[in-house]
Image: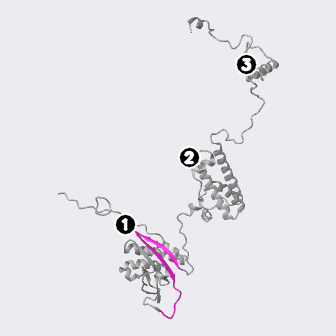
């Protein structure tokens, strides 16, 4: 590019002349209603329409139609970045407001504290943030998830009130809303940690399992049928019924070997690995630990107890047998559960031997330090 071509270029470009002002296309339809600036030429409506048609023809007929109105969005949250999330949040708030008003008209709100504590418990499990991300079509952060769960918990509280009061129609409507946000694993989650009930067999026997430290014990408990002519009363006042019982044959534990010896079983005898408790546990403290659940429940001498203990020492095995006996008593007589729970016999004793540490003599004992 040479210097002559540059000098020949005009220094400015004129968009409007002195006799005619430039008017944008969007203002042509209302040009007759606008004030005319000083020095501009007034255009009549016919001329404005002709110019607009020429502009539309030049743009391929894609001109803007100012008379055509755009349809209104269905939701007021249409222009937000998370319209689905705010729509669902608004629906939950409206449902809470309507339910609260209905319960107030029925004089069920506000509830006193003692009435709220007597409501029927209805635990629930909500969907995880990952599952709600799909429903709300947005990433469920901790704050957003908390907002949703707070509203759902309030709805669940109203569901408890309506269910306890007997208003099934209100409870069904609230339950339909809550069911959308409940997790599909609700039953499995609520069943965790619940103790399975012990089932008695056709002969009325219970089979339980006890643990303590590294020991484990299997316990069978059989109610005493009654007192016959061969029964006697010992010095402590307990009834003893003498019967010859082959324990291995009774529980199907024989392997076809030599015929085991028969043991004289009484109602006050507890067999541990086919050996009477007095012979298997020579220490009185171990025997007292085993008999303690029977004494607390008041059923000493009412059941025949057969146990198989494995692992650990005498303390661990006696604690495992006591745990299994307490569970067996609760299976036979559920009304004793309160007493056994207060004595902490129905739960496994979590205390364990602390392991030995490196460079220490035992778990915490250190070697003697010698200066020289």
Crowdedness near tag 2: few (<14), some (14–19) or many (≥20) residues, C-alpha within 10 Å:
few
**Residue identified by numbered label 3:** 23
Crowdedness near tag 3: few (<14), some (14–19) or many (≥20) residues, C-alpha within 10 Å:
few
Sequence-first disc among 3 and 2: 3
* In this view, the mark in front (2 or 1): 1
Looking at this rendering, what residue extends furthest in the left direction? 372
**Residue identified by numbered label 2:** 141
| Alpha-carbon span between mark 2 and mark 1 | 44 Å
**Residue identified by numbered label 1:** 353
Looking at this rendering, what residue extends furthest in the right direction? 46
Sequence-first disc among 2 and 1: 2
Tags 2 and 1 touching, CB below 8 Å = no
- Residue numbers of the magenta segment: 205-231
Sequence-first disc among 3 and 1: 3
Measured from the top left, where is residue 129 in percent x and y? 57, 50
Q: Is residue 313 left or right of residue 366?
A: right
The reply to whether the magenta stretch includes residue 138 is: no
Measured from the top left, where is residue 361 in percent x and y? 28, 63
């Amino acid at each position: 590019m040479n210097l002559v071509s540059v000098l020949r270029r005009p220094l400015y470009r004129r968009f409007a002349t002195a006799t005619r002002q430039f008017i944008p296309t969007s203002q042509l339809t209302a040009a007759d209603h606008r004030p005319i600036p000083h020095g501009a030429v007034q255009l009549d409506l016919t001329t404005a329409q002709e110019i607009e048609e020429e502009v539309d023809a030049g743009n391929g007929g894609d001109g803007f139609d100012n008379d055509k109105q755009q349809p209104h969005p269905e939701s007021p949250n249409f222009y937000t970045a998370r319209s689905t999330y705010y729509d669902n949040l608004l629906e939950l708030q409206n449902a809470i407001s309507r339910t609260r008003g209905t319960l107030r008209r029925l004089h069920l709100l506000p509830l006193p504290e003692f009435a709220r504590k007597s409501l029927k418990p209805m635990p629930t499990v909500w969907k995880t943030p990952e599952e709600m991300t799909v429903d709300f079509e947005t990433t469920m952060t901790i704050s957003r998830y908390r907002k949703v769960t707070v509203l759902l918990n309030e709805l669940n509280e109203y569901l408890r009130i309506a269910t306890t009061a007997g208003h099934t129609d209100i409870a069904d409507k609230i339950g339909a809303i809550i069911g959308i946000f409940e997790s599909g694993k609700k039953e499995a989650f609520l069943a965790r940690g619940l103790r399975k009930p012990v089932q008695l067999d056709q002969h009325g026997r219970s089979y339980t399992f006890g643990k303590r430290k590294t020991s484990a014990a299997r316990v069978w408990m059989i109610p005493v049928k009654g007192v016959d002519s061969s029964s006697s009363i010992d010095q402590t006042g307990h009834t003893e019924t003498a019967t010859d019982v082959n324990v291995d044959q009774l529980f199907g534990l024989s392997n076809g070997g030599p015929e085991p010896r028969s043991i004289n079983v009484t109602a006050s005898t507890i067999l541990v690995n086919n050996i009477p408790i007095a012979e298997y546990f020579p220490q009185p403290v171990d025997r007292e630990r085993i008999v303690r659940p029977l004494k607390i429940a008041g059923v000493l001498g009412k059941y025949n107890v057969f146990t198989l203990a494995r692992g650990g020492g005498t303390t661990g095995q006696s604690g495992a047998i006591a745990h299994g006996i307490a569970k067996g008593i609760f299976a036979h007589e559920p009304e004793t559960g309160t007493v056994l729970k207060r004595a902490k016999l129905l739960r496994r004793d979590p205390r364990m031997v602390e392991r030995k540490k490196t460079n220490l003599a035992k778990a915490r004992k250190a070697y003697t330090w010698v200066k020289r």
